[in-house]
Image: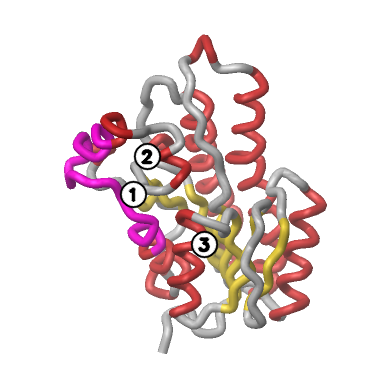
Amino acid sequence: MGKLDGKVVLITGSAGGIGAATAKLFASQGAHLVLADVAPLPAAPDLLTLHLDVTDEAGWTAAIDQAVKRFGRLDVLMNNAGIFKMAPLEETSVAMFEQTVRINQLGVFLGMRAAAPVMKAQGAGSIINVSSVGGLVGSPNNIAYSGTKWAVRGMTKCAATELAPFKVRVNSIHPGGVDTPMLTAQFQGAALAGVAAGTPLGRLATAEDVAAMALFLASDDSSYSTGSEFVCDGGMSMA
């Protein structure tokens, strides 16, 4: 018996990295999956795959409607889609800053807002917002990304207070360095090794490490957790 038997889960950014690993784990635990991304997704008869730009308000409405039409409900929303670009403060363009805000912050807001009415009507639900260790501590050359991830942390708590009376839980996950293309696009070679070496546990996270934490938050194992930060950073934020 799986921990997510019969639960309907929508995961954004599910074409690769953390999203794909989470989808695989959730499927093994009995979830009905709604996978959304701007990148192509594999088709399967037991999946609902959607092209979703998380900055598109109408796209979010359509995605939630399709999920409910297909499966009858929505139990879990994992706001995982995001981008990571580094630049010093004085070299961060307005265009890059605004793009990061739209995807990392606005996308999470739109997702929570679209899912809330369905989950409130059910009297149950779990929203998982993927923030970052960058939403817990500051670091150089990271003002756009870190700013949005702090915002996700705050929005999570605000939504959690509003939705708690309806038994809808909202929590954030804060990964550190995760061995996915999003990280390796910014760090290679010695720089990437330095990120791993600078982590107290001495390695990068795998996407599966983060997926395991998402499973806890999606399942009834975390039924008494809301408005909280779940850190998966190998000790990076304490070092």
How packed is label 2: few (under 14 Cα within 10 Å), some, or many (20 or more)?
many
Relative to 126, is 71 on the left or the right? right
Residue 231: mark in rendering? 1
Relative to 35, is 126 on the left or the right? left
The answer to which of 54 and 147 lies nearer the viewer is 54
The answer to which of 124 and 33 lies nearer the viewer is 33
Judging by the rendered image, the residue that carries numbered circle 3 is 169
Residue at 36%, 52% in the rendered image = 230
Q: Does 208 lie within the magenta span?
A: yes
Query: What's the coloring here?
Result: secondary structure
Residue at 66%, 58% in the rendered image = 40
Q: Is residue 108 visible?
A: yes
Residue 200 place in picture, x, y as percent: 17, 41
Name the amino acid, label 1. Answer: Val
Judging by the rendered image, the residue that carries numbered circle 2 is 133
Quadrant of the snapshot with the C terminus = top left
Which segment is the magenta one?
Answer: 193-211
For the residues marked 2 and 3, what is the alpha-carbon distance in whole angstroms?
21 Å
Residue 49 place in picture, x, y as percent: 68, 67
Secondary structure category for the residue under label 2: helix
Q: Are marks 2 and 1 in contact (CB under 8 Å)?
A: yes
The answer to which of 136 and 94 lies nearer the viewer is 94
Secondary structure category for the residue under label 1: strand
Name the amino acid, label 2. Answer: Val
Quadrant of the snapshot with the N terminus = bottom left
The answer to which of 28 and 179 lies nearer the viewer is 179
Q: Earlier in the sequence, mark 2 or mark 1?
A: 2
